């Protein structure tokens, strides 16, 4: 069972991002403050859940949270400030948009900086309910966004790969070139570009 908080009687916001390793699209982050009594045994790291489970949990999180918000950093911004800084910026934007100011932050990962006291939690999305909830919101809202982009550029199969560097995605980039949504500072074709058509 995931933990409801790190320190009792403190307003903690869990925060996580989605899309950091993608070749295309924005990076999304979510911040969630859950009531200390909240429990749902289905809630877990979004990567361990099916797409159906994630979308089923999203309204449960939104309806029960004390506050929640999503932050977005565009592909252009990613190219300008690099993906690590973009991930931090997306988290900051999500945290700044919370309607309730947290007293402390639980951040998934090992690096961060903020003027609110924070704790970096490696694999925190599999340990704390609030981070798991944030991971689900970040993932599902980013998936919605990539599904919309797929309508514009169906040849890249973003409805399936969501912008991640799959072989199908890279073959499409080699065949059709990049789009305005691709991250120009990323290695879009990968190390095996010479063998894409073998």
Image (cartoon, rainbow, N blue to C red):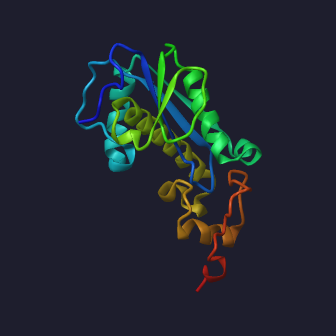
Lateral position of residue 36 relative to residue 102, left or right: left
Instruction: Work out which residue is located at the far bottom of the displayed protein and give it.
Output: 198
Please state, as top left, top right, bottom left or bottom right, where the C terminus lies in the image: bottom right
In the depicted structure, whether residue 197 falls above or below residue 103: below
Which residue corresponds to the image point at 28% horizontal and 22% vertical from the top-left? 38
Relative to 198, is 5 above or below?
A: above
Residue occupying the point 43% across, 42% down: 122
Q: Residue 150's spot in the image, x, y percent?
A: 57, 53
**Residue 20 appears at what percent x and percent y?**
57, 48
For residue 83, above or below residue 164: above
Expressed as whole percent of the image width and height from the top left, the position of residue 84 reads 63, 45
**Image quadrant containing the N terminus:** top left
55 vs 23, left or right, is: left
Count the marks: how many?
Answer: 0
Q: Nearer the viewer, residue 116 or 23?
A: 116
Q: Position of residue 5 (x, y in %)?
A: 34, 25
Which residue does the image show at 67% across and 64% down from the upper left? 188
Q: Is residue 122 left or right of residue 154?
A: left
Closest to the observer, 145 or 114: 114
The image quadrant that residue 116 belongs to is top right
């Amino acid at each position: 069972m995931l933990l409801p908080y790190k320190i009792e009687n403190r307003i903690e916001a869990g925060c996580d991002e989605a899309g950091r390793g993608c070749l295309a699209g924005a990076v999304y982050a979510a911040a969630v403050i859950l009531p200390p009594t909240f429990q749902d045994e289905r809630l877990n790291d979004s990567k361990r859940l099916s797409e159906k489970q994630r979308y089923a949990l999203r309204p449960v999180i939104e309806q029960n949270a004390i506050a929640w918000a999503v932050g977005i950093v565009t592909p252009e911004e990613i190219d300008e400030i690099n993906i690590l800084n973009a991930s931090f910026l997306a988290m900051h934007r999500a945290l700044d948009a919370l309607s309730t100011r947290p007293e402390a932050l639980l951040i998934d990962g090992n690096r961060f900086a903020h003027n609110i006291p924070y704790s970096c939690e490696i694999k925190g999305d599999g340990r704390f309910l609030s981070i798991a909830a944030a991971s689900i919101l970040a993932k599902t809202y980013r998936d919605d966004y990539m599904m919309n982009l797929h309508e514009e550029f169906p040849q890249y199969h973003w409805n399936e790969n969501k912008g991640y560097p799959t072989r199908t995605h890279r073959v499409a980039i080699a065949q059709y070139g990049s789009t305005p949504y691709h991250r120009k500072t990323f290695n879009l074709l990968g190390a095996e570009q010479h063998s894409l058509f073998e």
